[in-house]
Amino acid sequence: VAERDDAPAVYWFDSLYDVEQQLTNFGTGLAYGGVWSPAREQIAFISNDSGDDEIWVVNRDGSELRQLTSSNTEFNAREIGKDTFIPELSKFPSWSPDGSKIVFTSNRTGNNQLWIMNADGSDQRLLMDWDNWTPYNDWEPVWVKYLDPPPSLE
């Protein structure tokens, strides 16, 4: 497989041995925004290879490249070309401290909201599902791991 130098791709770099490896090589799509899993040698990233920005994962050795989110193609086909059409995007993945979940931003409900899914892409749902819609935009979640236990609420 030939490496591309004309589009952003996800790379792995070992600074100790000065070794670099390209992990993604999409035909027409870009790959960017990679984030390491804290629990396994896996990287979540964004690519538009499928047409819209979606969340993907790949192992550090370049194996098991998988698309985790996907746009509503039926909706897109019906709405594309209209002045009100906004493509569905899923971006800004962030791993849970144990690597079992990924939180991300998606506009699939009409505005940017925080979503959560299992690390394999299953069980995608709104993070704050109070009424399935909110007038506020949320984006770029970052999952933080604290070493100390939370303070007591007493």
Image (cartoon, grey):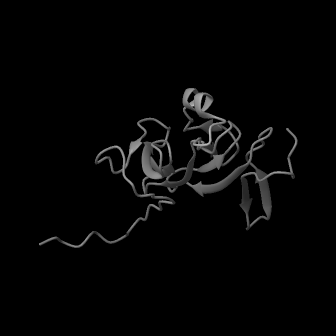
Query: In the rendered view, would you say 70 is above or below 12?
Result: above
Image point 32% across, 72% down: which residue? Answer: 148
Residue 83: x and y, percent?
62, 42
Number of numbered callouts drawn:
0
Query: Quick one: 86 or 58, which is closer to the camera?
Result: 86
| Front position in the image: 78 or 93 | 78
Residue at the image position 57 percent from the left and 35 percent from the top: 71
Q: Where is residue 154? Give x, y as percent.
A: 11, 72
In the image: residue 83, left or right of residue 16: left
Q: Quadrant of residue 145?
A: bottom left
Residue 76 screen position, x and y as percent:
59, 33
Rendered view: 65 above or below 141: above
Q: Is residue 1 above or below residue 4?
A: above
Name, please, the residue furthest toward the left. Answer: 154
Q: Residue 29 appears at what percent x and percent y?
A: 75, 43
Q: Is residue 154 visible?
A: yes
Question: Is residue 1 found left or right of 23 in the rendered image?
Answer: right
Q: Is residue 100 visible?
A: no
Q: In the rendered view, does 148 fall on the left or right side of 7?
A: left
Question: In front: 67, or 147?
Answer: 67
**Quick one: which residue is furthest to the front in this view?**
83
Q: Nearer the viewer, residue 147 or 112?
A: 112
Residue at the image point whose x is 47% and y is 50% from the top: 111
Quarter that holds the N terminus? top right
